[in-house]
Every structure is written in structure tokens, then in C-alpha cells.
Image (spheres, rainbow, N blue to C red):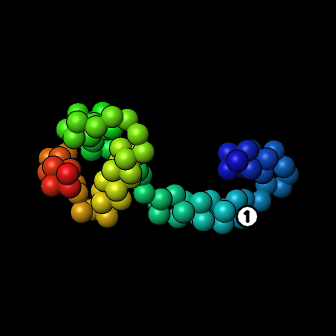
Amino acid sequence: LMTVFEADIAGTTPSDYSMFNKLKAIYDEARAKIKKEPKKLLAGEDIMKMLGMSPGPEIGAILEELREKQLAHEIKTKKEATLWLKNKS
């Protein structure tokens, strides 16, 4: 949308970029605050294999708990995730 907005301004005479510049600054600031989702440390298949479980809601719950711990920086590596999972069972 920002590209379309900028193109629209460029196609008008006189071109006034003041509003575009304000919105671009807000957009850039918001993008800087958004954190990318970290790469999953363990997959559902890993958990099922390690715990000898079948697919089901329990696996999803474990994955969600692991994800929350990863986002909270309590678990940072695959090794830490594996250790946490072994201690959890």
C-alpha cells in the first residue's frame, strides 16, 4: 500500500510527500518493533519419537509450551529443548 500511495503522489501535480513521509516513519517504526518468530527447536515428530507418543493434542500442547519458553528466552538451543523435554516426561 505504501508503494501505491507513493506512486499516487508521484502522479499528481504538485507532488506533496509530507503525509507519505509521516506514514512511512510510523510504518518503519512499527516494523522495527515486530520480532520475527524464531525457528522451531523441535518438531512434533521429534517429540513423538523422544517420548514414544502418537500424534494428538498432547503433542500440540508440548509444542506450544516449548514455543512460549523459547520466546521468553528460557530455552535457546535444540540441546536445551531436548533436555527440557526429557525432564518434563
Q: Is residue 33 above or below residue 41?
A: below
Q: Is residue 78 left or right of residue 28?
A: left
The residue located at (77%, 59%) in the rendering is 16
Residue 53's spot in the image, x, y percent? 28, 37
Depth check, front residue: 56 or 1: 56
Residue at the spot of label 1: 19
The residue located at (31%, 64%) in the rendering is 72
The image quadrant of residue 78 is top left
Q: Is residue 80 left or right of residue 29?
A: left
Residue 67's spot in the image, x, y percent? 35, 53
Residue 31's spot in the image, x, y percent? 51, 58
Q: Is residue 52 left or right of residue 16?
A: left
Q: Is residue 19 above or below residue 7?
A: below
Q: Residues within 10 Å of mark 1 (few under 14, many from 20)?
A: few
The residue located at (70%, 59%) in the rendering is 20
Residue 80's spot in the image, x, y percent? 16, 52
Q: Is residue 77 visible?
A: no
Q: Is residue 78 above or below residue 52?
A: below
> SS class of the residue under badge 1?
helix
Type of amino acid at the residue the image marks with label 1? Met
Q: Is residue 64 visible?
A: yes
Depth check, front residue: 30 or 38: 38
Q: Is residue 45 above or below residue 42?
A: above
The residue located at (47%, 59%) in the rendering is 34
Q: Is residue 42 left or right of residue 26?
A: left
The number of numbered discs placed on residues in the rendered structure image is 1
